[in-house]
Structure formats: C-alpha cells, structure tokens
Amino acid sequence: MTISINQIANGIGLQINNDIFIVTDYSHVKPGKGSAFVRVKLKNVKTNQVIERTFKTADKLEDAALEERRMQNLYNAGESTHFMDLTTFEEVVVDNALLGDSIRFLQDHLEVTGLFFNNKVLKIILPNFIIAEVTYTEPGLKGDSISGGTKPATIDSGANVQVPLFINIGDRLKIDTRTGEYVERVKNESKRD
C-alpha cells in the first residue's frame, strides 16, 4: 500500500528497496526558495543502521504494516530458537542468525517482542533489562566493593559479563541487554513458607 509523504509518522514501517525501515524522526522543511520537502531518519529493522533520506511532498512511499507480538522463549534447537506467540499460543521458529548477539541473554521462558511483517518474523526484541543469576565466577572477597575492579562472571543465560569483585555465585543481577553491562545486584526475595 502506498502512502503520501504527509501521512508519515514516527514508528511507522516503510519498505524501501526491499528493506524494511522504521521512521525514527522526520521534519517538514519549507525553504525560502523551491518546494517543500520532508527529511526523514530511518532505521533498518534487520541491521539497525540509521539513514537519512529526503522526500518531496509529491513522493509516494510504500507502507510496511509492522506488527508487534508478545512471545515467550521455549527452547533452543541448534540453529534455531523456538518461541510461543502469547496471543495465539502457536510455536514460532526463528533462525539464530536473526537473533544476533542478543541470543546470549535469552533466558528460559523470557518474554520478548517479535516484530512481524507479512506474518514473518523480522526481529526479536529483548527487554532492555533482565534479572539473571550468576552460575559461575571466582569467589568475592569481603571489602572488594570499594576497589572498583571487575571480574568475569557467567549468568544463567550462558553469557559472560563483567561484574564487580564482590559478586558471588548465586547472586541475582540486573543486566542491560543492549550493552551487556552489569547494572546492579538485586536482592533475593525472601521465600515464604
């Protein structure tokens, strides 16, 4: 479906040269001389590359109706990962190459957002933060909290992250999935009998 440049808005999907882009910013420009135009920043859904394009007000664009669906990670099967669509309860298989580096933070039963175009998964978006348990790290020493040093630790998703020296096995951490960085230690909730 084609749309006019006046129908452009932040967050809509556009198909340009067989790639899908999301509009991240746009501005209408009316110069003193010449005709008005629209300057648009577009983010490629697959590569996350941001480009800037200029369109004349008479240009028509190809609309890409994107759909976000809540999904839950079920299991990894070698080259693919299986998710459950939380609306239809259907199983959706996603190639691990599509997940990219974010696969290292994919925990069992983690809820994610699937971005679909024509019923095909374009991208899996993880939550910005996850709570993960440390499964392995060297023991921490009392008083190491003030030194500011870090050490490697493996979390329950299998990812390796840098953590402060006072972190121990079994500690629960808040991890930023966008950067892979440690944010803070999370207190364990007391279990009620």
Image (tube, grey):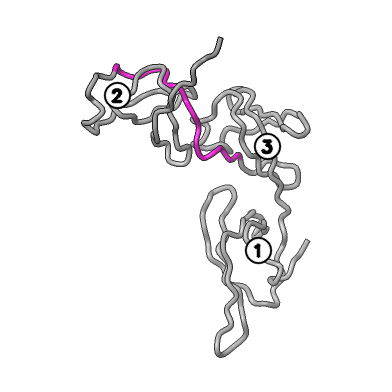
Give the residue number, with chain letter if any, for mark 2.
Answer: 166
Name the residue at 56% across, 63% down.
Answer: 25
Q: Position of residue 163 (x, y in %)?
A: 34, 29
Q: Is the residue marked by circle 1 packed among few (<14), some (14-19), or many (20+) residues within 10 Å?
A: some
Name the residue at 26% across, 28% down.
Answer: 145
Give the residue number, with chain letter if any, for mark 3.
Answer: 70
Looking at the picture, tell me which residue is in the foreground, 139 or 23. 139
Asked if the stretch drawn in magenta spans residue 134, the answer is: yes
Q: Residue pushed farthest top?
A: 193
Taking the image as shown, residue 149 lies to the left or right of residue 34, namely left
The local secondary structure at tag 2 comes to: loop
Residue type at numbered disc 3: Arg
Mark 1 touches mark 3? (CB < 8 Å): no
In the picture shown, does residue 43 fall above or below 126?
below
> Which quarter of the figure has residue 113?
top right
Tell me, for residue 74, which label it has, or none.
none
In the picture shown, does residue 1 fall above or below 137?
below
In the rendered structure, which disc, 2 or 1, sits on the residue that comes first in sequence? 1
Q: Position of residue 180 (x, y in %)?
A: 42, 36
Give the residue number, with chain letter if any, for mark 1.
Answer: 9
| Range drawn in magenta | 124-139
